[in-house]
Structure formats: C-alpha cells, structure tokens
Image (spheres, grey):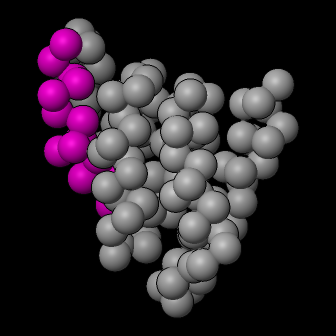
Amino acid sequence: MASVEALMALPSEEIIPNIRPLLEWLRDINWPVAGPVAKLLSRHGNELIEPIREVLNSDDAIWKNWVLSELLCHTASSVRLALSEEIERIIEQPTDAEKDEEVVESARDIRFLITHNDRN
C-alpha cells in the first residue's frame, strides 16, 4: 500500500489539518488502510480531541466503537482524559445502537485506562 506508506511519511503539519477526513477511514476497521491510519493518528495529541468528540457524539455506533477500540486506547492519556465526559455518557446512558454494537464495552476499556493508568 504505497498510499499508506506515503501518508506515514508526512510531517505532522500536514496530518493535523486532515485529522477529520482521516478519521473517516476508521468507520470500518476491515478496510486495509484503517489500521495504519489509526496508528498514524494515535501519534498525535490534543488536536485529536475535538474530532474524536464529534465521532463520539455522532449517531454512528460502529464508528464510535472503532475509534474507541482502535485509536483512543493508543492515544496520549491527555486525549483520553479530555474525553472522559463522553466516555462516561456512553457507559451510563448508552443508546440502543451503542449497546448493540458493543460501544459500551469499548468505553469501559477506555475508562479502565483512565482510572488505572492515566491518573497515576
């Protein structure tokens, strides 16, 4: 996948303005580019917060699950901490789709990281 290799070689200054479109690739983790894109995005910090917040507040439960399980679990602790409110909302007041797509379980995994790793 030459396109993924080229993307990985780009400097942060070129990646950051494209975080939102890159997150689109995480709508389906089965797409060949999804894993490498998640890895690339996980290297970034606070610039991920608002785009991830938008995903977590969207109606796309499958996308939420992939962002939580494939991206957010590998980001800096500051990113997870900044999204604590959204994580708690998913756990405490999940939609039916979030329950059906196992988003709640992924959110619990992130909460575990926050409470056991990120606050120490």
Quadrant for the C terminus, please. top right
Instruction: Give the quarter of the image for residue 107.
Output: bottom right
On the question of residue 7 being in view, the answer is no
Q: Residue at x 19, y 13 (%)?
A: 13
What residue range appears in magenta? 13-30
For residue 14, side relative to residue 43 (left or right) = left
Camera-nearest residue between 75 and 91: 91
Q: Residue at x 84, y 38 (%)?
A: 116
Where 64 falls versus 92 (above or below)? above
User: x, y (%) of residue 22?
Assistant: 24, 41
Q: Residue furthest bottom?
A: 96
For residue 46, side relative to residue 76 (left or right) = left
For residue 23, side relative to residue 3 (left or right) = right
User: x, y (%) of residue 17?
Assistant: 15, 28
Camera-nearest residue between 46 and 19: 46
User: x, y (%) of residue 87?
Assistant: 58, 57
